[in-house]
Amino acid sequence: MDDLFEQAEMEAISYIKARDPSIQALNLPRRFDKPTNLLPLFGEESQQEDEKEEEDGRLQVYLRFKKADNIEQYYEVQNDQTLLCKIPSDAQCVRNIRNEKIVKKYIFTKIFPPDAKQVDIFNGVVKEKVLRFINGQNCSLFTYGASGSGKTFTILGTDQEPGIIPRALEYLFQTLPQLHEHTTMKPMHPGLMIRLNSSICKTEREACYQIINSVSDRKLHCEMYRSMQKRLSNEPGAVLDEADDVNLGVWVTFAEIYNESIYDLLVPQPPRGKSRQKLCLGAIRGNNYIKNLKAVNVMSGLEAYMVLQYGQQNLQYAETQLNSHSSRSHCIFTIKLVQNSKKDNGTSMSQFHFCDLAGSERVKKTLNIGDRLKESNNINNSLLVLGKCISTVRDIQKNNSDGKIVPFRESKLTRLFQKALSGHEPIAMIVNLNPSRIMFDESLHVLNFSAIAKDIIVEKTIIRNERRESRFSQFLQSKSTGISEFQKYYDEEKEALKSIICQLQTELQLNEDTYQRDRARIVAGYKDIIDNIERCHQQQMANLKQIEDNKVKLLEGKINMLKSQLDNDCKSGIIDLTMDENDIDYYIEELERCQRDIERQKIHYEGELRKKDVEITYLNKKLSIAEEDNQKLHLQEKIKQLEEEVATLKDTLSDAQNDYVELEAKLSEYQDLYEAQVLKIVQLEEENSQLKAALHNSVRDSEDDFELDL
């Protein structure tokens, strides 16, 4: 059918055998109370066996109704496998059809009514598959349906009504013997398991304890599981045969596909602002798997349940118009059972995948916008691709043609389950149906999808159980001589090489894991160091800037104070000098005026002296010619009087000349003082210019130093 899986076909091996405890009298003859014709019974039994064999060869699709009242208006359950769907006239799918009475018939593996309990779902769907899983067979179980149809309730349940995963975990660990504290093998990917030493086993157990201790409301979940465990204690586990010579280990993984990206739900959430690490898909011999997906070793159902709850904390949920707690991603919880034979050191691994698909949504009903709208588009796209893949595989199987290409690579979900969806691995699907009228169109689409999925043919897997050697076979083997020494040597060398290869692969995987962990730790450490350095540098720069700003402000204050003080001093000095200069000018003007007055008086007195001299000369002449003594005496008195006046004038003139000399000296002194004041003003102006230049240079140097510090 698919060339990709031809090389992957291998025989499933199991070193243990699990069976239902109710089957105690296997292959005993059937008893009849009275003789009867056996031919019809044989015919009927043969027909039932053929129908059961045909049913086992197809993809098993189970229908479960969500709890509701009056579902008979649109749905009629004829028997455990047949459903009649009565399409109303106002449905979207028949809006162009005139016939109002349309009834569609759907066949399922089994139909569970609305009042079905969780235990009925587990016993009817999962219990037998857990037995096959213990016996070495891989199994995949999907829950499919529209948003709000009860898928998550079916697969996880509540503390009062546990879902199929908690019940499967409890049933599995009830069946398995007490597991060793240190498991010997760890599954890495399909076809590769590595052997663990004691230190690595201890590390794996510590990782499990760390996850369990990180669960929020841990005590509440433990109490919930304990109460669930009490209710499930009345349900017996399976009987395990030939388990003494086998070492067993149980590992669990938990992943989600969100917006077509794969994330590990068992890895702690990154700090705010950092994105989660995206995982990639890989393929080995036709088996697709998730690379670097964390596997956790669990020793009990409680540990596995706590790991499941830790993954639920990291799962993407959001509120929509149809569901207040809607899953926004496809989540995949996987249980891996590793068997290691003590007798021949052989190993085998089986996987049980529980996949809770996100519900298909219509924007018209959910009213999603923004991120919710993007999530709805991705969910609907992946479910559309899933439908296309199942439809294409069905057509290929019906027509026996390999011409069509199945679009597995269009979605991460279909690519991961490519082998199961192609019919090469057992797969089952629980279809959840919401019978309300508002969800009828979505429910009809789900029913049409399940009808297509029901036609997928699944290849039958033959499980070979290793049998113990009897004493007779051991005796024959000891007596056998058919094996030559060369064949023994060849087998020994082959086994030695196999062990060396296994050891090298183990060391390589461990080194790679150690390298990845160390690299992640070192990168995270360096990132923290760089972040701390950047924060310290930014803090130091902020502090330096604050200090420089304070210095600049202080310098500016001092400069402004000096400027104001200098300006005040200059202004006061200039005012004083101006006042002194005005006084000097006033004194100079007064002195010049006095000098002018004295000069005028000097000229006046000199004129008067000349007049008196002329008059004295005239009188002397007149006296010499005077004839009478009285007149001569009168003239002499007059001359004497004039001489006294002349002497007085001379004294006044002498005083005026002395005053003039003193005024000239004082004027010269004031002129020297004036010139000194002018020179002082010039010196003050030069000092002011120098201070302003020095202040400008100091401010510029401070700014240059601050820029260099930055």
Image: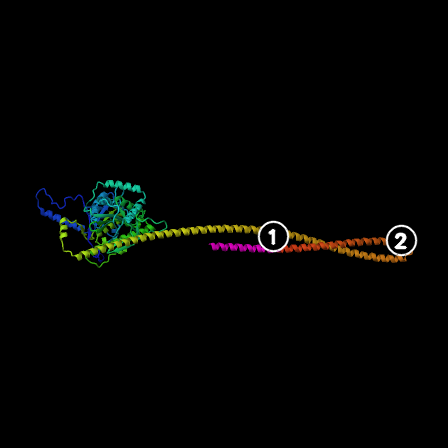
Q: Which mark is residue 570?
A: 1
Q: Secondary structure at mark 2?
A: helix
Which of the pair 573/77 is nearer the observer? 573
Q: Residue furthest front?
A: 485
The segment highlighted magenta reads 683-710
Whether residue 542 is visible here, answered yes or no, is yes
User: At numbered mark 1, what does the secondary structure look like: helix, strand or loop?
Assistant: helix
Pick whichever of labels 1 and 2 is earlier in the sequence: 1
State whether residue 390 is above or below residue 215.
below
| Category of crowding for the residue at label 1, using alpha-carbon neighbours closer than 10 angstroms: few (below 14), some (14–19), many (at least 20) | some
- Tell me residue 400's x, y (percent): 19, 57
Foreground mark, 1 or 2?
Answer: 1
Residue 661, label in figure: none
Q: Quadrant of residue 393?
A: bottom left
Question: How many numbered marks, from 0 up?
Answer: 2
Report x, y in % for residue 540: 45, 51
Q: Nearer the viewer, residue 125 or 404?
A: 125
Magenta stretch: includes residue 596: no
Q: CA distance from mark 1 to mark 2?
A: 76 Å
> The N terminus lies in which quarter of the figure?
bottom left
Residue 592 left/right relative to 621: left
Q: Residue furthest bottom?
A: 403
Residue nearest the observer in this picture, 456 or 521: 521
* Kind of residue at badge 1: Cys
User: Could you classify mark 2 by the number of other residues whose Cα lies within 10 Å: few (under 14), some (14-19), or many (20 or more)?
Assistant: few
The residue that disc 2 covers is 633
Residue 154 can be seen, yes or no: no
* Amino acid type for the residue under numbered disc 2: Leu
Between residues 104 and 473, which one lies in front from this camera angle? Answer: 473
Residue 241 in picture, x, y percent from top left? 18, 46
Q: Quadrant of residue 299?
A: top left
